[in-house]
Amino acid sequence: MPPELLRQVRLIEPNEAVDRIVDVLVGADAVLAIANQLETIPDSTQIRDGEGLVLAPGLVDLYSHTGEPGFESRETLADLVLGAQAGGFTRLGLLPDTDPVCDSPDQVAGIQQRLPTPCPVQVYSWGALTQGIGGQQLVDLAELAKTSIVGFSDGRPLNQLVLLRRLLEYLAPFQLPIALWPCQIDLAGDGVAREGIQSLQAGLPENPTLSETTALAALLELLAHIPTPVHLMRISTARSVELVRQAKARGLQITASVSWMHLIWNSAKLATYDPNFRLDPPLGNPRDQQALLAGLEDGTLDAIALDHQAYTFEEKAVSFAEAPPGVIGLELALPILWQTFVATQRWHPLDLWRYLSHQPALCLNQPPPQVRVGHPPEMLLFDPNQTWTVTAATLKSPGLNTPWLNHTLMGRVLQTWCPK
């Protein structure tokens, strides 16, 4: 494969706070050169005009769902990784809620064996904490820790505090991320909308803020006595941001992520009754949305998570309250977040890449992707001005459960490089 020269491309590199126009020479196995202007290049080099394009490290997905095994009608692993590649993601974390559940070494190996060869992205499995992710009995954590898992998570709330205490004590020596979703299931009940004026006006069953904050407060109390590092998933309320900020000020070893949808929308969207706004946790009230944005910007929250989940048309084509929670996002997040926050100048591109690449990798105890001479190319080329329409024909994934279906977006990933 001949080298490729990206001529006068905008390089965004959060590892070194770089934002400049450069020439980048890319080989098959490494970035060969970066300079303001390269004069000497190999004769076989293919030259690509990079004017107006953005070259940046690959994106890192903390946690998403796969339909395979068990729910292939929603999305296969092959579909999922092609969608991730099309969205600029070079690393993809899979939650264990497959069928069978990823709660044993055999199931972890099975996921890796099902991946396409060669695989266009790096795929990591989260190993379950409890058998069948039922929240009752711990799996053989020591055996799972010997596999290729990226860390431990059920992807579901764990409300048994005695069990939670024991697993925090037991997992401390393993030095693997533990991702926990603070949610008190009894308080959440059958609620599908965050409690507030919008849920009242929509007449939808309410899920109170307390369902998240009481579980989070209890977990933080445990962590004050058992200093095991934990990643807090799906933070969605203003009060939770306050609790995380206070916990970090106390020195607790925590990181936290927020779903990309909760940054863009709030409970005002309940008025549409579009089941693609049915999420778990529910979209927050406007005050929650603003607190989540402020928490991300001041470092209280560390990263943006995709929490991608595909469903069939039939599963989502029901009433709001009956719809399963979740939407797709791997192919859509970068252009939508760019237009919402970068194009409006609320965020610098470096901020966006910190939230979607640098910080998620650190949350996983991994070195972040980077664009650096001598390193394997783990990066993406993005055109922030290209327009395209979200349809079944333009998406790599068969999952169409998104509020942007049949809408025209601005910004698209042109190419993704991932180390072999």
Image (spheres, helix red, strand yellow):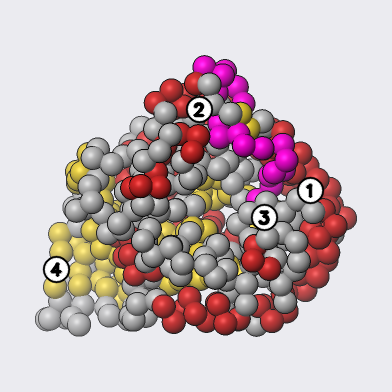
- Residue span colored magenta: 181-201
Residue 182: x and y, percent? 69, 47
Mark 1 or 3, closer to the camera: 3
- Reading the image, the residue beneath label 1 is 220
Residue 35: x and y, percent? 29, 65
For the question of whether residue 102 can be seen, the reply is yes
Residue ID at (82%, 53%): 161
Say which element carries label 1. Answer: helix
Q: Amino acid at mark 4?
A: Ile
In the rendered view, would you say 80 is above or below 384? below
Q: Earlier in the sequence, mark 4 or mark 1?
A: 4
Mark 1 or 2, closer to the camera: 2
Q: Earlier in the sequence, mark 2 or mark 3?
A: 3
Distance of mark 2 from mark 3, alpha carbons?
A: 24 Å
Q: Nearer the viewer, residue 318 or 26?
A: 318
Q: Earlier in the sequence, mark 3 or mark 4?
A: 4
- Reading the image, the residue beneath label 2 is 267
In the rendered view, would you say 26 is above or below 232? below
Say which element carries label 4. Answer: strand
Q: Amino acid at mark 2?
A: Ser
Distance of mark 1 from mark 3, alpha carbons?
A: 11 Å
Distance of mark 4 from mark 1, alpha carbons?
A: 53 Å
Distance of mark 1 from mark 2, alpha carbons?
A: 27 Å
- Reading the image, the residue beneath label 4 is 47
Count of picture labels? 4
Distance of mark 4 from mark 2, alpha carbons?
A: 48 Å
State the image quarter where residue 231 is shown: bottom right
- Asked whether, in this view, residue 315 is left or right of residue 412, the answer is right
Residue 50: x and y, percent? 20, 57
Q: Residues within 10 Å of mark 1 (few under 14, many from 20)?
A: many
In the rendered view, would you say 258 is above or below 30? above
